Structures are given as C-alpha cells and as structure tokens.
Image: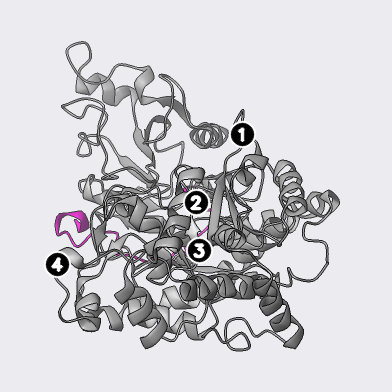
Amino acid sequence: MVDLKAKPFYLDDDACAWVKETLAGMTDHEKIGQLFCEILWDRPGSDPEDLFSNITPGGVMYRPFSGARMNEVSHLLQQKAKIPMLVACNLERGGSGGNGGLTDGTYVASPMGAAATDDPQQEYRLGLVAAREGAAVGINWTFEPIIDIDRNPENPITNVRTFGSDPDRIIRMAKAYMDACRENGIATTIKHFPGDGVDFRDQHLMASVNSLSADEWFASYGRIYQELIDYGAPTLMASHILQPALCRMVNPEIRDEEILPGSLSKELLQGILREKMGFNGVIVTDATQMVGFTCSMPRRQAVPLSIEHGADIFLFTINQKEDVKYMTEGLESGLLSRARLDEAVTRILALKASLGLHKNKELVPDISVLNKVLRCPEHIQWAEELADRCVTLVKDREGLLPLSPAKTPKVKLIMVTNEKVAPGEVLPEVKLFKELLEKEGFQVDYFKDSPYPGAEISLEDYRRDTDLLIYYANMKVSSNQTTIRITWDDFLGEDSPKYVCDIPTLFLSFSNPYHLTDVPMVKTYINAYTSNEVTVRAVVEKLMGRSAFKGKSPVDPFCGLWDTKR
C-alpha cells in the first residue's frame, strides 16, 4: 500500500481524494500511459505532439532547448495532456551546462565544482538557479542530485558529475540542492541506485557492477541513500548496475545468472529500497535504451517486468508503439500484475499532487517570468563567486606561480579535448583563455601553429621561442565511452608534456580531476572542474596572483599513485 499522507508526498485530504478518484476513472490504456516518461529533443523534424501517438505519457524529459522554446513546448504538452505531466530535465549544473538544461541558461558549475568549495550554500545557490530557470520554462522534476561516490578514478561517467568521494560531503551537498528545489516546487531525484563509481565501466554500454560487500555498501552508498530518503527525496532513479551482495542478502538462493541490474531487480527495488530502507516515493528507471538494460533480458519481458519488480516509471522508449505493446501484453499475460500497475500509477499521481499539479493553476509560467530570471545578474554573480572558491591548486613543485609576462612572455597553448571539433577549430573557452592571457601581456600561440622539436627545429631553438607551455584540458564525461584518459595526437606524444625538464609547464584541467594519471611528470597542476566562462576568468585571476586558490579537492587528485605526487 502507498501511504499518501506520509513522506515524501504529505498529501492533504483533497489531494488524496484526487489521486484515488483519478485512478478509479482511468482505463488500463491511460494507466499504462502514465508509466512512461518520454524524451524530447530539439531537432529538425521533431514534433512534440508525436509523443502522443500511442499514449498520453505521464511525463517527458527534455534534452537541451532554448528557454523560450522549452517554455513554448511545455505549454503545448500540458494543454494536450488530460492529467498534468511531469516535465523533467537534467539540471545538475544550474540552468545550463552538462547534458541537459536550457542552452541559454546560467551555467554555474559541475557538481564537483560546487563540492570543491566545501560549502553547501554554494550548491544551494546552484540548485536555486536550476530551480528558478527550470520552473520558468515549465520544468517540475529534475534528475538530480547525483549521489554516486567517486571511488574509482577510471570510472568514465561519475567524475565531476559527483560531489566527490566523501559520503558526508555528498550528503551535505545533496541536501542543499534538494532544499533549493523543494522551495521552488521542483521534485528531485537521487541517483544512480544502487550506486555508480565502483566499476571502471559504463552502464550505458553494459550492465556494470557495484561490487562492494553488503556491509561496505550500507556503510557508504546505503548511508547516503538512507539519509536522503529520510530527508524526503521524492523520487529515485534505479540504474543498470548490478549489486550481487545485496541481491544475495535478500535472496540467498539466487543464482549468478538471476542477478539483475537495479532497474530490473526485485531484490534491490522491493527488498532493499521498499522494505529495508522504507522508501515510499517514486522509482524511475534509468534510460531504457542503454545497453545495461537491453542486454539483461528480452525487451518484451523487460518492459513489463521493470514495473512488476518495483519501478514506477519507465524512462524513454526505443519505439513507442512497440514498447507500449510490450507493456500492454505484459498486463494481459500476467507478467505485470494489476496490483503493481495500480500501485505505480498511484505513486505517480501522488507525486504530481505533491507538486500541486492537480490544482487548476498555471502549470507553465508566462514567458515574461523566464525573461526576468534567465541569466539574471544575481545568477551570474553566484556563478562567479562559486568559480572563485572552487579552483584547486593541486601542486606547484617548481614555484611557477604566480605567472608573469616578465618571467615567461612567450606561451604555447595546447588544447586537450574529447569534444568534436573540426581541424584547426578551438573551443570558445580556450579562445577566451588565450585572449585573457594576451591582455595580461603574454604572447600566446597555439602549439599546433608552429614547429615543435624535431628534424627541422632543435630543442634549443624551440626553447628560445617558448618560455611556458600551458595545457587547457577539457576531457568531458559523457555516455558511450570506456575511458576519459588522454590520447595524444602523435604516437611519440609530441603534444604531451615531454619536455617538462626543459620548459616550464602548467597543466589546467577544466573537467576531469584525475588527469595526473596521464601527466604525472607535470610539476604545476590545477583542477578547475568546469569549462565555462566564469571559471576561465577565475583561473586567470589566480594564475596572475590576484586571487588565492581556495578550492578543497573532493577526491584524491593524485589517483592513489606514487609518481603523481612528485
């Protein structure tokens, strides 16, 4: 049974009545529609009304849109839906940035950037920006905060999307984000249960594994989840990650081949989350196009069994008509019981009522509200203050800092990125960094625009024309990758820091905090966590000695390696 008046819904009598009456008046087809949260891209030929081709979905999740377009589409969707929709987005970095949000919103910082301030108020402000700008375009649900533990430097997904490796800091930061969203009528989602960051593989490409023992899990991931469930987390995302120890704790007879990822595991969803941890909120699967989901069992079975085994919302379809058919056939055959269907829909309706969506109020604000909050001066100021407090000096073994054009006037700048750029193209943030250095009086050239030591130029000649090498690294975490290690352009690493003993070298990481794995020889290394304009400006201020380095690393930037500390 779902307790509508208990945490996290806290519904009053009128809201409880709306949930019960709405459920009683729905057909099976309408109930099945509520189970689906679809995805919407802002692409040529994409028509938001196509989402209603086979069902009226219970929710939608935006990929990046402009604020004005998102506001317009939200109006359209809510007008078309009989029952108000959950409208979701990834707002982990403020109103913009990362893999979601508004393309013209305020990009505050990565979660790890906020965590590097060691001040929950900074994450609270980031959450306020996310909530204010998101609410102005009709968003009422965000797939944050990310509460994974950054235990493994080789994990290609967690990285700067997390609050680091300390459970206490993760809890403090997550609560601050949740507070900001709750105050602005936006439901939050704790993820990715049972917890990413242990494995070195990517659940987008396989069902990865959280291999901790049950005791280790409850002392780390479990403690974080329990604390935030008790704090009132309304929704939780179940990922395509296996946790064998927990499954065996719930079901000692389970065989290895029967252990399923969190998105499909009855042991994890019902045995751990519902029964042991007392979670009464909504469980949403992670994206069901991911290999970690599709490889676990035939999709015809996986679609209905995800709900039967404990999830309430099925995130995204591969082919809507087919996936709706699979869910319907599952109900008809008994793979999905009517009891679980009604329980899932009840929780979905309760979440909507807890947000006040059942009341006939304006579900999407007028565009004038968006114009007032989008990239407003206060949001920009908060982003600047966070940037000033997060940049972390990891090491400066040769006293290179502060920089001075009198000491090292001629600079070669090397861009290290995994973003798709055309030959000769430079990222906007790198261009800005170059321009700011030139304003300081440095002569800055791109490394690739001039010859480097070899048959045509000697090292001594190169040294006469180069006083300082600066690396701008923006190796972003993203899905569909197996590593975020640096790959140099030449097999002999001509663009690598191979001449650190001959030419002063500075390495700046604006994303991955673990790059010392690949450049242990570098003596001066800085983590900035976020590649955006405000962070670039903050870094330059610190390089020139006008601002102190204030960041406190949320992870071990030396990656547990001996040679990185030298």
Q: Mark 3 belongs to which amino acid?
A: Ile
- Label 4 vs label 2, nearer the camera: 2
Residue in the foreground of this view, choosing between 559 and 180: 180
Quick check: is 106 in the magenta stretch? no
Which residue is labeled 3 in the image?
Answer: 313
Q: Are marks 2 and 3 in contact (CB under 8 Å)?
A: no
How dense is the environment of label 2, judged by Cα within 10 Å: few (below 14), some, or many (20 and up)? Answer: many
Which residue is labeled 1 in the image?
Answer: 46
Which residue is labeled 2 in the image?
Answer: 324
**What secondary structure is marked by label 1?**
loop
Is residue 173 found left or right of 275 in the rendered image?
A: right
Distance between the alpha carbons at the discs numbered 2 and 3: 13 Å
Q: Mark 2 belongs to which amino acid?
A: Val
- Tell me, what colour scheme is on the image? one colour
- Label 1 vs label 2, nearer the camera: 2
227 vs 534: above or below: below
Quarter of the image holding residue 466?
top left
Which residue is labeled 4 in the image?
Answer: 256
Please tell me which of labels 1 and 4 falls first in the chain: 1
- The residue at the point 36 percent across, 87 percent down is 276
Which residues make up the magenta segment?
543-566
Q: Mark 1 belongs to which amino acid?
A: Ser
Distance between the alpha carbons at the discs numbered 1 and 4: 42 Å
**What secondary structure is marked by label 2?**
helix
Residue in the foreground of this view, choosing between 299 and 291: 299
Distance between the alpha carbons at the discs numbered 1 and 2: 20 Å
